[in-house]
Image (cartoon, rainbow, N blue to C red):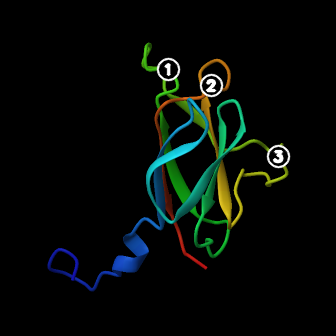
């Protein structure tokens, strides 16, 4: 029961995928759950490939990068407008595309992503 009240569905509230990685020298997963790999697409752009696919493309995610730790200017992008053939929102049921940005795309040393939604 959630906080002494009505029944709570734990499965709906859990992250289905998360990863921490380093893009400064290739795409290295430092720790993860339900992530098969980080694939380097281009400078500052990474595909997060799921081990178990999502049930549909209507999932949500949060992303953090230290694209420019010197200025504290942390920017990111996960919508490339289908530029890599993935679709208008940079995601499919198999992967999500992420990018670290600081006036231009940049390979950052620290990238975190959390995905919430339904698994297939």
Whichever of labels 2 and 1 marks the residue nearer the N terminus, that label is 1
Residue position marked by numbered label 2 in the rendering: 106
Q: Is residue 84 left or right of residue 21?
A: right
- Name the one closer to the observer, 59 or 69: 69
Q: Is residue 41 left or right of residue 14?
A: right
Whichever of labels 3 and 2 marks the residue nearer the N terminus, that label is 3
Badge 2 marks a residue whose secondary structure is loop
Q: Is residue 95 left or right of residue 76?
A: right
The image shows residue 7, relative to residue 119, as above or below, that is: below
Residue 68's label in the rendered image is 1
Residue 84's label in the rendered image is 3
State the count of labels: 3
Percent position of residue 76, x then y: 58, 34
User: Residue at the spot x=43%, y=65% of the render?
Assistant: 15
Q: Residues within 10 Å of mark 3 (few under 14, many from 20)?
A: few
Percent position of residue 95, x then y: 66, 59
Badge 3 marks a residue whose secondary structure is loop
Q: Are marks 2 and 1 in contact (CB under 8 Å)?
A: yes
């Amino acid at each position: 029961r959630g906080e002494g009240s009505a029944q709570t569905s734990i499965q709906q509230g859990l992250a289905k995928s998360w990863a921490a990685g380093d893009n400064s020298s290739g795409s290295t997963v430092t720790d993860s759950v339900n992530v098969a790999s980080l694939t380097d697409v281009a400078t500052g752009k990474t595909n997060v490939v799921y081990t178990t696919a999502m049930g549909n493309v209507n999932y949500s995610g949060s992303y953090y990068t230290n694209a420019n730790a010197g200025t504290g200017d942390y920017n990111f992008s996960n919508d490339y407008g289908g530029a890599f053939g993935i679709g208008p929102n940079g995601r499919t049921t198999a992967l999500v595309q992420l990018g670290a940005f600081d006036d231009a795309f940049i390979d950052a040393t620290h990238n975190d992503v959390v995905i919430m939604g339904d698994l297939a």
